[in-house]
Image (spheres, rainbow, N blue to C red):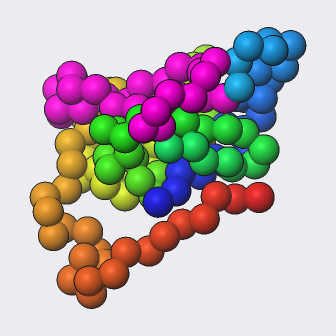
């Protein structure tokens, strides 16, 4: 299980954490909402709680709660600027599709993942 960051995402998170000694990384999660069923959540984290999974990617600590991890496993997080807007963008292999605004997504049906027929899962290692 792994979640990785692009260089842009890592820089954005690090810039927010610089000078804030209480915050140690970013918490990623999902919640039920939106026109497609689930939405991503982001928050800066001050402590790790029981059940949290911790990932390191590009010298940034990422924390995911146990309930959200199956929905985010294998994801790659980028930070993109488009016109006057900027936002974090997930490349999530577990998402079947996103709503038009990109705020919510729904999951692939069980067995829809490309490698599920082989009985094995690719494990992505955090980028160094």
Residue occupying the point 34% across, 31% down: 30
Q: Is residue 34 above or below residue 68?
A: above
Residue occupying the point 37% across, 75% down: 121
**Residue 87 is inside the magenta segment:** no
Q: Is residue 51 above or below residue 4?
A: above
**Residue 40 is inside the magenta segment:** yes
Q: Is residue 109 above or below residue 32?
A: below
Residue nearest the viewer, comparing 29 with 94: 29
Looking at the image, residue 59 sits to the left or right of residue 26; the answer is: right
Residue occupying the point 31% across, 38% down: 67
Looking at the image, residue 33 sits to the left or right of residue 41; the answer is: left
Residue 85: image location, x then y, percent: 57, 20
Residue 29: image location, x then y, percent: 40, 32
In the picture, residue 81 is in which quadrant? Answer: top right
Q: Quadrant of the C terminus?
A: bottom right
Asked whether residue 11 appears in the rendered view, the answer is: yes
Q: Is residue 35 above or below residue 1?
A: above
In the picture, residue 59 is in which quadrant? Answer: top right
Residue 8: image location, x then y, percent: 72, 39
Q: Residue furthest front?
A: 50
Q: Main secondary structure of the magenta part?
A: strand
Asked whether residue 76 appears in the rendered view, the answer is: no
In the picture, residue 66 is in which quadrant? Answer: top left
Looking at the image, residue 53 sits to the left or right of residue 18; the answer is: left
Q: Which residues are magenta?
A: 25-52
Q: Residue furthest right?
A: 19
Looking at the image, residue 46 sits to the left or right of residue 89; the answer is: right
Residue occupying the point 32% across, 46% down: 71
Tell me how many marks there are: 0
């Amino acid at each position: 299980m792994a979640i990785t960051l692009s260089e842009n995402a890592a820089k954005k998170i690090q810039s927010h954490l610089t000078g804030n000694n209480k915050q140690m990384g970013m918490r990623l999660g999902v919640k039920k909402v939106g026109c497609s069923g689930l939405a991503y959540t982001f928050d800066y984290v001050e402590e790790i709680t029981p059940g949290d999974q911790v990932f390191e990617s590009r010298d940034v600590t990422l924390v995911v709660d146990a309930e959200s991890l199956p929905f985010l496993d294998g994801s790659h997080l980028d930070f993109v600027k488009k016109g006057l807007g900027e936002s974090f963008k997930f490349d999530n292999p577990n998402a079947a599709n996103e709503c038009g605004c990109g705020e919510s997504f729904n999951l692939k049906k069980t067995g829809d993942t490309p490698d599920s027929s082989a009985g094995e899962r690719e494990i992505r290692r955090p980028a160094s």
